[in-house]
Amino acid sequence: MLENYDLEHFFFKGNDAIALMKALDIRKRVFIEEQGIEEKDDLDGKDRRSVHLLVLLGTKPVGTARLRKIGDHSLKLERFAVLKEFRGIGIGKNMIYEIEEYARKMNIERLILDAQMYVKGFYEKLGYSVCSKEFYEAGILHVRMIKRLIEG
């Protein structure tokens, strides 16, 4: 589906103010405006200490994700968002592939994420497995998922 699109991915550290502003705008539109999450629940103080992915379609920012190192061999995938008008064309799947490639290059053994229940199937199709009971975060039902990237 993405063959006709000029898609660019880049990873940046949280101290890149311009890129972070673009990522936060996507998160605001998806989490706060669309899903009704409170801003304090999205802005948790971890952005500057994290690595982020920003996805551009041409010059327009359309997707973002945050990665935080958990221990020596795990990354937690957080704040994964694609603008509503760009969903369903493969951008999210493409983002996951880029994140996994980035993690492998860092010798990360596993990715962990807390998936909203309505997107659990999306992650399962990409090889993620449920590893927790259902729980609420910011008033939305979630489940923790994991994918082993490097057998160890």
Image (tube, helix red, strand yellow):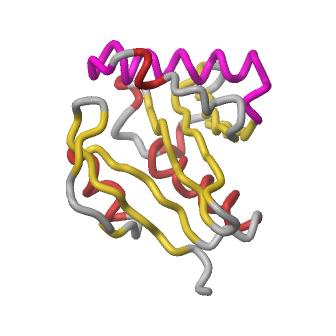
Answer above or below: position of 139 versus 34.
Answer: below
Task: Using the image, determine if residue 104 lies above or below residue 8.
Answer: below
Query: Which residues fall within the magenta stretch?
Result: 13-37
Q: Residue at x 34, y 57 (%)?
A: 144
Residue occupying the point 46% across, 51% down: 93
Please indicate whether residue 134 sits to the left or right of residue 150 in the image: left
Task: Tell me residue 43's x, y (percent).
Answer: 51, 22
Verify whether residue 36 appears in magenta.
yes
Q: Position of residue 115 (x, y in %)?
A: 33, 49
Q: Position of residue 140 (x, y in %)?
A: 23, 35
Name which quarter of the figure residue 139 lies in: top left
Q: Residue drawn 30% across and 37% down?
A: 137
Nearer to us in this view, 137 or 14: 137
Q: Which residue ends up furthest to the bottom in the rendered image?
A: 152
Q: Quadrant of the C terminus?
A: bottom right
Magenta segment: does it hold 97? no
Q: Is residue 140 left or right of residue 29?
A: left
* Image point (27%, 17%), residue name: 36
Residue 4 position (above or below residue 121): above
Task: From the top left corner, tell me how far across and down residue 74 is, in percent.
Answer: 60, 64
Please tell me how many numbered marks the rendered image carries: 0
In this picture, residue 128 sits left or right of residue 7: left
Which is nearer the eye, 9 or 143?
Answer: 143
Task: Give the side of residue 27 with respect to residue 68, left or right.
Answer: left
Main secondary structure type of the part rendered in magenta = helix
